[in-house]
Image (cartoon, rainbow, N blue to C red):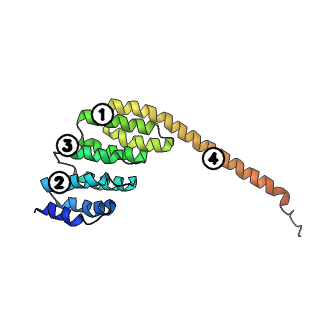
Amino acid sequence: MGLIENVIYSCSNIQDENERALVLSPLVRHLRGHDKEELIEHILDFSSHIQYGDTKFQILSSLVPYLYGLKNESIVEKALELVYGIISEYQRIESFSLLLPFMDEQRKEEIMEQALELAFNLKDKNMALQALSVIIPHMDESRQKEINEKAVYFKHEVQSEYLRRGAAALLRRVETLSSLTPHLDEPGKRH
């Protein structure tokens, strides 16, 4: 039995996939070549069964730095399967952006379009701007310009929303102070 088989066997007693992934993920950095690919693939296989999107995102984030130099395209596809199980749209977008450097051009374009659609459909326009900021660096210059122009609209919408909220908050303060005025003591008068 090889090193990776021993590690996987030893960790198989850990029933909770979250814990097992958190135990195995840090070991990846100490491996090279086929052993590293095998362990990453194993972690991705069982991590898709994890219920919590935050944990999936944490596992994926911890593995991405070790994908550089890997030749196994199925690992990136398994990582994408993990991403599709992340509920938070923003974390899904961020996860897509982490994986884009490891994809061929055609797959990269497909995933970038999915990420852009998610970003443009986020209700929170400030969050949408943040999401776009993690996708844009992976685009060619003309596409970056196009998306930046669309993002300007979101920026204006976010600024307008902040102004509306600020004005509403100020109005509430004025109304509150106005309602207290009749109850304030006149200077020099004591009860």
Q: CA distance from mark 3 to mark 2?
A: 13 Å
The residue wearing badge 3 is 73
Point out the frontmost of discs 3 and 4: 3
Point out the frontmost of discs 4 and 1: 1
Is 174 placed left or right of 41 in the picture?
right
Q: Give the residue type that dot 2 points to.
A: Glu
Q: CA distance from mark 4 to mark 2?
A: 54 Å
Q: Residue at x 20, y 43 (%)?
A: 73
| Residue 139 in sight in this render | no
The residue wearing badge 1 is 109
Nearest the viewer among 49 and 54 is 49
- Element type where label 2 sits in the image: helix
Earlier sequence position, callout 3 versus callout 2: 2
Q: Position of residue 57 (x, y in %)?
A: 35, 52
Earlier sequence position, callout 2 versus callout 1: 2
Point out the frontmost of discs 2 and 1: 2
Q: Are marks 4 and 2 in contact (CB under 8 Å)?
A: no
The residue wearing badge 4 is 166
Q: Residue at x 55, y 41 (%)?
A: 159
Is 127 placed left or right of 82 in the picture?
right
Q: Which image quadrant is residue 167 in?
A: top right
Q: Residue at x 63, y 47 (%)?
A: 166
Q: Residues within 10 Å of mark 4 (few under 14, many from 20)?
A: few
- Element type where label 1 sits in the image: helix
The residue wearing badge 2 is 38
Q: CA distance from mark 3 to mark 1?
A: 16 Å
